[in-house]
Each structure stands twice: as C-alpha cells, then as structure tokens.
Amino acid sequence: MTDIMNLLREVSKAKGDFVFVPRAVRKKADASLKRGIDCILATQVIVNGHRTAWAQQHDVLTLRPTSARNYEMPSVSAAESAGVAMFLMNIPKPSREVVTAVHAACAWFEKTKMTDFAYRFVAGQGRLLVAAPGNGPLWPRYAEIGSDRPLFGDRDKTVHDTVDEISMERRNGYAWFNSTAQQALDRYVTWKKIHPLDRVR
C-alpha cells in the first residue's frame, strides 16, 4: 500500500515520468493520497491509550487488525510497520498527527527489538531462534497486541509461543524474524531532530 501511495504522490506532484499528467488527475491523486494517510493514522494499533505500530493486514470495514492466511494472525507486525513509518517520515511537511504516529511507532520498535539472537538453520531441526551474542536486533514477524510477545502460526490455524512448536514446513518457509525495523530506526535518528515530539504536544 505504501508503494501505491508513493505512486500517488509522484503523480500528484507531476514528478519524473508523470509530468504529462493533467491537473485534474493530479488533484484526484493528491486527494487519494491524503485519504490514504488518514487511513494509516486510523489503523495504528492503540493499546491502553498509547499508539504502537500496525498490523500486517487490517479489516477493510472495521480497520482492526485481522488474519489472512491460516498462519497469519491478528497482531502487530514490525516489518510492515517499518515500511509505513518510513513512508510517513518521507512526508515533507508532516502534520502533528503524522509526527505523533512516527514517534510512537519508533518507540515500539525500540521496545520490542531482540538482541543477541539469530534466526538460522540448525542441523536436523530447521530454522530456529538461537543465542548469538552481538547479533541483532531482530523483531518477530508477529507480536501479540497488548503483551508484545512473539506469536507463531501454523497451517492448521493454531497459534504458538515459540517457533520450534510449529511444523517444519512453516518454520523453514516463512520469515518469522526480520531486521526491517532497523531501517526505520536508522532514518528516525535524523528525522526526530527535525520533528521533535515536544513540538506536537
């Protein structure tokens, strides 16, 4: 979705390959982009009054986190949230709501990062989360809403506490841990100096 919104932004600004786009179409693209940003802000998961990050997918009607494939449960997803946060940080003149959303998401990334672990193949056991001093940070693909504990799903729709509890096929065939959120945190170092949180309170 962020790729689509980036496309809408380029069309609305008549950038690059889109310099030929008529003014009326550019206006429609800009209006769609603004609605998309409003949707992003509306879907940020709130726990006990505090914004966190986003789900991998949200219900089209309720906007709440929802499931997709059998092993993809309603939860907060660091990888997709990182993409959303980076999109928001690329807005030239962000609103107070956008600034608040970014600060909250990056605080959640910091809170949930895992260090000194690696997700790698172990002989005869498939991919496992193993101790690896100095490695990381990593984030689980899915974090339970509220507790932030990692969640792991299997094709039979069961949900598990550890990755070694799920079938070998799903353990080896899905990215249960990733480092994508670090890209957002790296970008955030510079961004937060330009858009400090105290200016939006």
Image: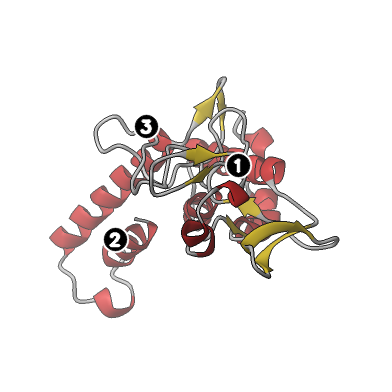
Q: Quadrant of residue 6?
A: bottom left
Which one is closest to the eye, mark 1 or mark 2?
Answer: 1
Q: Which residue is drawn at 49% across and 38% down?
A: 159
| Residue designated by label 1 | 150
Quadrant containing the C terminus is top right
| Residue designated by label 3 | 64
Q: Relative to 64, is 12 on the left or the right?
A: left
Describe the element under mark 1 as helix, strand or loop.
Answer: loop
Please, which residue is most extreme toward the bottom here? 17
Residue type for callout 1:
Pro
Mark nearer the N terminus (1 vs 3): 3
Residue 37, image x, y percentages = 37, 45
The reply to whether residue 68 is visible in this rendering is yes
Residue type for callout 2:
Leu
Q: Which residue is drawn at 43% across and 40% down?
A: 73
Residue 178, image x, y percentages = 60, 59
Quadrant containing the N terminus is bottom left
Which one is closest to the eye, mark 2 or mark 3?
Answer: 3
Viewer-nearest residue: 28 or 102 = 102
Q: Do the residues labelled 2 and 3 touch (CB within 8 Å)?
A: no
Viewer-nearest residue: 186 or 178 = 178
Disc on res. 162: none
Q: Residue at x 61, y 51 (%)?
A: 164
